Amino acid sequence: MLERLPEELLERILSYCVVSPLTPSSRPSWHANGFRDRLAPLLVSKTFFRIGNPLFYHTIHIQSASQLHHLLSTTLRPNPSLATHVRRIILAGIWADAGELLCLCGNNLKLLDIHLDTTHLPQPVNSYIRDLDAEDFCEGLKGVKSLTHLMVRKSSNVYLTQPRPRQVLFELAKAVQEWDELVRGYTLFKVLLLIFTRSSQTSLFVSPMTRDIHYTEAPSRPSFDL
């Protein structure tokens, strides 16, 4: 009976069942029912699969480097067309493979939520060590052109003077100047703006089309209707 409805209406109905919410599930990582609940409508019929499959990849939560590597190696690299359906990416860290993910999504990506972390070294070192994860991630930012919403967050034990956060924020400041469609930017730490003004960079969220910009007191997970 549902399949007799207009496809536009079916798509809207399925979006409530298939699209992952911006706020991740509070269930433990080994609890897979949330994933299965989203997948179940796609198995109802060929029509549901055709309409719901793009919705399934609309929002992607990445909690670890291993999860991201598995997503790329088993799904997006063999089927790069699936990446064109991704509109929102929530990253719990900075990883090299995230740069590839950003490149695959390209101009289709509309929301990027990143959690700054820091490099974990086995022992203190005095010499400079390249952060390949940060470098590859920042390289991927260059492939994003149509972002409309950006969220930058960090843990209390991550400091903006550390090499990785500083490098990522520096590249973000340059990337934002190319994001003409950016309408909202959130940060959860006040010092961010000061860092970029002192380094002679344009303020982090300056964009010709910017309308609603917040530097502090952002919601833990803003509700963007994308």
Image: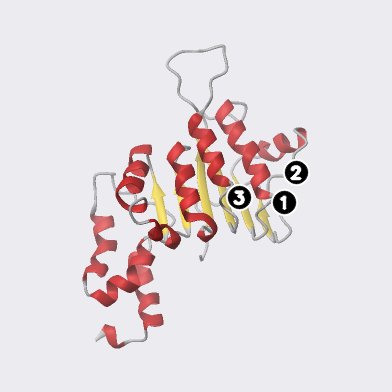
Q: Position of residue 191 (x, y in %)?
A: 67, 36
Residue 68 falls in which quadrant of the image? top left
Q: Quadrant of the N terminus?
A: bottom left
The circle on residue 206 is 1
Q: Position of residue 24 (x, y in %)?
A: 38, 51
The circle on residue 202 is 2
Q: In the image shown, does 89 or 50 lie closer to the viewer? A: 50
Q: In the image shown, does 98 or 38 lie closer to the viewer? A: 98
The circle on residue 130 is none
At label 3, the amino acid type is Tyr
- Real-space CA distance between mark 1 and mark 3, rounded to the nearest whole angstrom: 12 Å
Q: Residues within 10 Å of mark 3 (few under 14, many from 20)?
A: many
Q: Are marks 1 and 2 in contact (CB under 8 Å)?
A: yes
Residue 195 falls in which quadrant of the image? top right
Residue drawn at x 38%, y 66% is: 55
- Real-space CA distance between mark 1 and mark 2, rounded to the nearest whole angstrom: 7 Å
Residue drawn at x 74%, y 58% is: 208
| Tag 3 residue | 186
At label 1, the amino acid type is Val
Tag nearer the camera, 1 or 3: 1
